[in-house]
Amino acid sequence: MHKLLAPFALAFAVAGTQPLPAFADAGALARKLQDGSADAPVMVVAHRGCWSEAPENSIAAIENCIKLGADMVEIDVRNTADGKLVLMHDTTIDRTTTGAGKVSDISFDALRALKLRQGAGGPGAAVVDAHVPTLEEALLAARDRILVNLDLKVANEAEVFALVEKLGMNGQILMKLYDTPQDARLINAPFHGKTHYMPIVGVCLPAKMPGCTPQLRAPLKDYARFKPVAYEVSFFDNRDFLKKTLSQPRAKNTRVWVNSLGKDDERALVDPKTTWGGLIDMGVSMIQTDRPEELLAYLRSRK
């Protein structure tokens, strides 16, 4: 059974275009996540935080998501050279900080001395007075306030989950793995029955080649014994594949997560009804986006 968190703050009703709550109730969000019924409300997942006015994977980006009213924030976790768990998407720090080099080659103290770049970073991005956060700092910022999806770019998820348990945040965390039901990493994962789990099931072969044919790593029903709360379907802009996947038998009361990033988000800003609305009408109930504010506005308009 999933451990749900006690409410941290009052949940406020939102109607029309009224402001969203500044503080969420993580227990209520966890119960929302566990509702995989056909009429369950769509959940908004902010990719690398809400970074339109903050550096990605920063404490400010997490705070922005909470103020905005997103359901979940996705953050990326890596190890420094001396083993510290920090937030960083790329293998290198070049794009998002004032430094350069691989995260795995840099000590935590050296990394901490650098500053973050605004938004998605890059050489032209403004430098801000903020530093690369540790995973613990990020989790403490989110604790009791918003759900967290951990994109683990570490060799051993056990140390990550040990920190989650130490902070008492089991019910707030969504763990995801690419592994198939036959893979030892999934079979022996330390978080089974202790937090929320989601397999990533879509794969395009040959990898990263134009015209490749999307397929599943394994039938959805084969993951049922691991009690997933959702399935992440990478559909590579192939909606016929997504539709076929959604028609498959799967574990009861589970959600379907898709990514609306890059060109998908750009299309959604012009035509949200076809882009986001089309996905929702097919049965998608979780959307990860770099445009959480616009997606939230669109969802309010559908009511």
Image: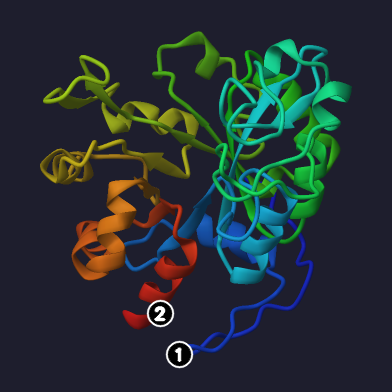
Q: Residue 222 appears in which quarter of the rendering?
A: top left
Q: Percent from the top left, x then y, of residue 17?
A: 48, 88
The amino acid pointed to by label 1 is Gly
Residue at 74% in and 78% down: 10
Q: Residue 42 appears in which quarter of the rendering?
A: bottom left
* Above-or-below relation of 175 to 206: below
* Residue 300 image label: 2
Q: Is residue 168 visible?
A: no
The amino acid pointed to by label 2 is Arg
Q: Residue furthest front?
A: 124
- Residue contact at pointers 2 and 1, CB within 8 angstroms: yes
Marked residue nearer the N-terminal end (2 or 1): 1
Q: Is residue 31 visible?
A: yes
Q: Residues within 10 Å of mark 1 (few under 14, many from 20)?
A: few
Q: Percent from the top left, x then y, of residue 54?
A: 65, 55
Image quadrant occupied by the C terminus: bottom left
Identify the residue position indicated by label 1 in the image: 16
Badge 2 element: helix
